[in-house]
Image: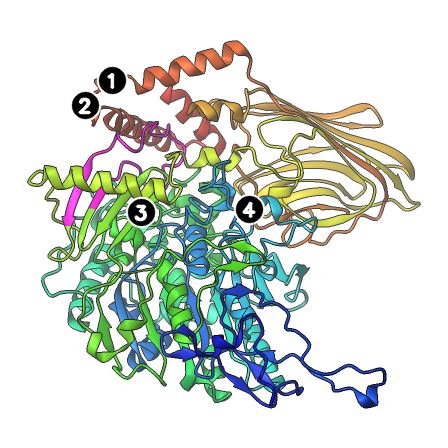
Amino acid sequence: MKKPFIPGCALICCFIAIAPATAQQVTGTPGSPGATTSIDGKQLPPPDPRFGGEIKDGALQSKPWWAPRVVPPKSAPNVLLIITDDAGFGVPSTFGGVIPTPTMDRIANEGLRYNRVFSTALCSPTRAALITGRNHHSAGFGVISEQSTGFPGYNSIIDRDKATIGRILLENGYSTSWFGKNHNTPAFAASQVGPFDQWPTGMGFEYFYGFVGGDANQWQPNLFRNTTQIYPFQGKPGWNLITGMADEAIDWMTRIHQTDPSKPIFIKYAPGATHAPHHPTKEWVDKISSMHLFDDGYNKLRERILENQKRLGVIPKDTKMAPWPDDLLKPWDQLTADEKKLFIRQVEVFAAYAAYNDHEIGRVIEAFQDLGKLDNTLVIYINGDNGTSAEGGPLGTPNEVAFFNGLNKLPAEVQLKFYDVWGTEQTYNHMSAGWSWAFDTPFDWFKQNASRLGGINQNMVVSWPARIKDKGGLREQFVHVIDVVPTILEAAGIRAPEIVDGIKQKPIEGTSFAYTFDTNNAKVTSRHKIQYFEMMGQWALYNDGWMLSTKVNRAPWEAFGPANPDPLNNQVLQLYNLNADFSQTDDIAVKNPDKIKEMKAQFIAEAKKYQVFPMDASVAARIVAPRPNITAGRSEYVYTRPMVGLPQGDSPLLLNTSYTVTADIEVPQGGADGMILTSGGRFAGYGFYLLQGKPVWLWNMVDLERIKWEGPDALAPGKHILEFEFKYDGLGPGTLAFNNFSGVGRPGTGTLKVDGKVVDTKTMPKTLPMILQWDESFDIGSDTLTGVNDADYKPPFPLTAKLNKLTIKVDRPQLSAADIAKFQAAMKAAADGPVSDELSLVQRLEARFDKREDCRKQADAQKLGPIERIGFVRKCLQ
């Protein structure tokens, strides 16, 4: 009698455990179409099996044989992995927040609550760790892809020796999918040129429906199905991605279930909420506004959340809060009436976004229940990929893109002009950092701050009705996002592969927390003992309850100052015992110098092990760092037909440089209108178009000002050469390599020509230094998503002239030898100081921050416009 064939191993494999107490399982008659097998999982994909039938000269004398279909172990659960965005510990009602999150409450009541879940302090680094089970630097995501640099820990490339959870589950018989935010495709590989191996579909997720990048306009997102851009919102007023992706996830899982009810599914569900822009529907804004949750301000909110947390038992009764940072954020009772009115509007929209998102997550969970799958579904619902974002600055902003260009203190009276449209498609809004501080209660600081619990201590709820019986239980063990992959694998009875596609895999660096599912293990010590943290030069080390932290020396909205050139050593070190000090408020460094020395050495060892070096404290400077995109090394670009959807990271960059754009067009009888070239959109960008027949070049300065060059006459029918030439008056982004911002955002002069004749010339006193609207694209012949000037046109605004040729020539500034010598000397002088004085550089940096605040206050007093304000502050700092 023939033995059943098991692909990828000898017969002895039948008795080898895949995971504890799990052996390979074979069903059906070997060789029949219905036969299935689980695999040992050591090698993925498993080797093709040998043919097990018989082949004679004729089919009638032969015996057919089919390879068994690969399936997971019989007990393997469905998995719904949910991670929200930019949400601190005190956001959800489940953990004491005032924002209603009944779906999270439901999962907590049916399963477990975790109060010591840790992120990396920034979004795509956390997500890279979440899907690989490796630390973020190990996975190439020391920072977000838009800041990537040419070092292994920072290049935003997940190497092939770190297969994702999607790939592992797929090869073991799961249907795998990813909905929502994808911030793990390199910005320089996000175009239709590819390569697509770093897109979700190339990393083991069979189906992708979501956006690529750090954030997206939820009303008109840069949305993809697999690798094709789609526009489901067109012609549907009120359409919102938060509902759209829930609909899509429910449709996908239903199709899979109806096609093969036995096949388990894995969904990574990653909504854009609550990252800026905060875009809830009006229905949810009205619901939250009617509750008056925030009328007494962020200081009182913080106190109320702390009381709730203690009452719910999700934090110790003796937990303390750090004092309010009066020098950083104005207390509520010191705000003007305009500021209070504005800030309440900002936070109500944020809260509505969080509540709306939780509701839609609930619909997805209900769909599991409707399909009869919820009992054997492992739901992991993580609140936030980092602490609450403070990137709106102390005042918030109607346009997040302004923050990334150094404009983050727009006065309240100016912002109130957006009051009635806050959170609609007319804003790319963010809230005051005062609310962010409160939403990280009981901790302090924010997203980006990797040395403070407010940036890294998340919370999580987990349910699995078939397995978890301690309903409503609290788990206080240390858990990091790298622990999620090994937990899912253990729950499914699937081993981590040793080889994938012939490539030996790096070991999983996380530790499964599946042991905490058992009631008997509710109070056992954590199996994850040591964990490093690092983000943009701020770092920490956790070791079995001890926490070594660098003192925060940069608020998240201070992204444009000189970076600490020695972030490993030029730091003030703090020490905490989190076993006795839940909220990291009692610094015991002075009493424990030997412990500090010991833990710093441990941090260095971990940093070397996981590719943290070279450590870099720069923030904005890395946004414009050179990367290997398809424009690298090119100075001329030629296009001969319309094309849309080229992302910012793969398109010609016209910031901080001289350039010439030339359009060869033919105007038909009756004239022409429409977009020739545009990049960006409503919240920052440029456009070259025909308006009522007249040529126009326009720069949208973060929706605060629009600078327009326009021809006086409509173009006559026939062929025309239109040209926009810009001469930049700065040294360019090369100065950033020397910790100096003087080369970016400088003035320049633009000249518009028609058939060789100058028709308009204007000088821009300042230019955008860093980015355009990054969820918009580079379009030729029409305009996708939002337009750069609503007063002139509405997208798609197709070009009705014939485009023969569009040429872009870029003349990037180059630093001379003398320039380099000067900047090197300045950088050395800035770093000079007594070697024994660890505080010296930090103090100088803090003094510069203080000087900047003084200059900004002077600018506020003069009521300068946004562009003039930038110039005044820079001159004041010189």
Horizontal side, residue 732 vs residue 553: left or right: right
Say if 266 sits above or below 558 in the image: below
Residue at numbered disc 3:
533
Q: Amino acid at mark 4?
A: Phe
Residue at numbered disc 4:
683
Real-space Cα separation, disc 3 to disc 4, in angstroms: 33 Å
Q: Earlier in the sequence, mark 1 or mark 4?
A: 4
Residue at numbered disc 2:
837
Q: Mark 4 packing: few (<14 Cα in 10 Å), some, or many (20+)?
A: many
Residue closer to the observer: 45 or 843: 45
As drawn, which residue projects farthest toward the top? 818
Residue at numbered disc 1:
833
Q: Amino acid at mark 1?
A: Gly
Q: Mark 3 packing: few (<14 Cα in 10 Å), some, or many (20+)?
A: many
Q: Mark 2 packing: few (<14 Cα in 10 Å), some, or many (20+)?
A: few
Q: Which span of residues is magenta-colored?
A: 548-576
Q: Earlier in the sequence, mark 2 or mark 3?
A: 3
x, y percent for residue 198? 58, 53
